[in-house]
Image: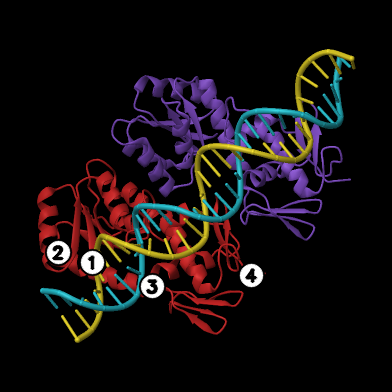
Chain colours: A red, B purple, C yellow, D cyan
DNA sequence: CATCATGTTAAGGAGTTGCTAAGACGATTG
DNA sequence: CAATCGTCTTAGCAACTCCTTAACATGATG
């Protein structure tokens, strides 16, 4: 079930959209202010965001920039102005699609589904090689030597994130933000546990590191084993 | 001209700081609420942010995390509490420096310039070479000849700080402020101990210096061994 | 030579990490 | 609709690392 956060100050519109989209099989969360919306996005990592540009407390373009800075979540913008330059500027600011008010909920649904389809498809990239480790992000496979590794989703994402930065120390904070998509709040203990699991599957331990090295008080890095 | 965003709800303090810092050559932008502050940060990408932790509309720590999630802009935090654990928690939450209220604008200016200096010097891209010593800040590795050095976090940070200023004498006070992040008091004895440990790992002593030289009564410097 | 700054080592405690196990949660299946 | 499976999170404890402090030694300075 795709999840949506809708940021819209007009209560009637918000409730209407929420009700109809819920019926259509979306998991909808509403916010009436920019700050509330930001928080909800961070907390629930929705699949798509609907953003009204005419919020009373903050310029819509600024909020869009903030959202873009935090996540790559697709954003569908609803605007009252139909000005061409405005639309272009909005799309340049990082919106994935737009709607001109007043819009029907059916229109909105169509846009949402289009955006969701697009975001599923866009996984590009080639293989990553580190030592005897071969990782294919788009196929979601990891092969060590000639043995295929059975990694859980999070384990795989974590390994890919490290593999894209071979030799560079990455902090747990960064991992929470980038892999877990929880820029704040989240406990960083999960990182330790997942690292431990990956190490086990790679046939190594923290005491006898091969690919994954811990830098005490700083983070971890993936390296070619020596 | 360095630009500053100051987030502070007390109008008198905000205006005072704004006026004085403007005279000193800063481009100052004030915000009285968390949301306004976030907006200004996104809009103007300042060189540094001054954040009062005692905002009425949002917990300071939360706002700090949000700022951290959005940008890497340095943040100097002003707090009313001088509690040690509090300070530590604040720095861990991503603050780059802190001030205890009430503070003079001169103190603030000094902290700002320190932070700015740090972020300019933060050329973390490349390696640093001194004699047979090769230091890579992003991988957090230090190699002497062909032997990898096992340095603790503080030892590494200290060595990097010295290595970025080869041949320049650095005082212990400066090291306490810049490496230990304790601009005020604080025993400087730890510096001696850490220097000693680094020397040992570099295979030298104070009596037979190689890379690290002491200038009695002044400080230490890193040099190419002769 | 008296005094002060620095050098070095050792020990304690605070904090971090590693790893196992148990619960929570959702998806899948019979 | 219950049972099962896979996954993620949390809790907890052991092991470990690191930093500080203290204490004493050594060296510099006037």
Q: Is residue B70 left or right of residue B48?
A: left
Q: Residue A118: in sight, yes or no?
A: yes
The secondary element bearing badge 2 is classed as helix
How packed mark 3 is, by other alpha carbons closer than 10 Å (few <14, some 14-19, many 20 or more), is few
Instruction: Give residue A137's position: percent from left, percent from top.
Output: 46, 74
Q: Nearer the viewer, mark 2 or mark 1?
A: 2
Report whether mark 1 lies on the same chain as mark 3: yes
Instruction: Give the position of the N terminus of chain A as an image quadrant.
Output: bottom left
Q: Tell me whether the residue at label 2 lies in contact with that at label 1, contact meaning CB atoms closer than 8 angstroms.
A: yes
Query: Front-most of C15 and A13?
Result: C15
User: What is the distance, in whole Å, between disc 2 and disc 1 at their CAs?
Assistant: 10 Å
Q: Is residue A120 above or below residue A217?
A: below
Disc with the residue nearer the chain's start (2 vs 3): 2
Q: Picture quarter containing residue B185?
A: top right
Disc with the residue nearer the chain's start (2 vs 1): 2
Disc with the residue nearer the chain's start (4 vs 1): 1
User: What is the distance, in whole Å, between disc 2 and disc 3 at their CAs?
Assistant: 25 Å
Q: What is the chain identity of the residue bearing mark 4?
A: A
| Residue at (85, 46) in percent of width and height | B225
- Residue matched to label 3: A122
Instruction: Give residue A11's position: percent from left, percent from top.
Output: 12, 48
Q: What is the chain identity of the residue bearing mark 1?
A: A
Question: Residue A137 got which mark?
Answer: none
Instruction: Give residue A2's position: percent from left, percent from top.
Output: 23, 67
- Residue matched to label 2: A21
Q: Is residue B198 above or below residue C21?
A: above
- Residue matched to label 4: A225
User: What is the distance, in whole Å, between disc 3 and disc 4 at their CAs?
Assistant: 32 Å
Q: What is the chain identity of the residue bearing mark 3?
A: A
């Amino acid at each position: 079930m795709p999840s949506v956060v809708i940021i819209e100050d007009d209560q009637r519109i918000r409730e209407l959209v929420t009700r109809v989209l819920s019926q259509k099989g979306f998991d909808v969360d509403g916010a009436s202010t920019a700050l509330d919306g930001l928080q909800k996005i961070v907390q629930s990592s929705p699949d798509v965001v609907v953003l009204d540009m005419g919020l009373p407390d903050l310029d819509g373009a600024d909020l869009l920039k903030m959202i873009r800075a935090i996540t790559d979540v697709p954003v569908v913008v609803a605007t009252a102005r139909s000005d061409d330059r405005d639309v272009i500027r909005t799309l340049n600011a990082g919106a994935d699609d737009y709607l001109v008010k007043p819009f029907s909920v059916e229109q909105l649904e169509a846009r949402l589904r289009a955006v969701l389809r697009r975001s599923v498809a866009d996984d590009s990239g080639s293989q990553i090689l580190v030592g005897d480790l071969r990782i294919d992000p788009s196929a979601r496979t990891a092969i060590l030597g000639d043995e295929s590794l059975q990694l859980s989703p999070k384990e795989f994402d974590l390994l890919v994130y490290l593999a894209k930065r071979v030799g560079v120390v990455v902090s747990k904070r960064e991992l929470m933000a980038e892999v877990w998509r929880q820029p704040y709040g989240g406990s960083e203990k999960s990182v330790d546990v997942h690292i431990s699991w990956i190490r086990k599957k790679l046939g190594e331990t923290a005491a006898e590191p091969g690919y994954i090295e811990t830098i005490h008080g700083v983070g971890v890095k993936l390296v070619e084993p020596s």
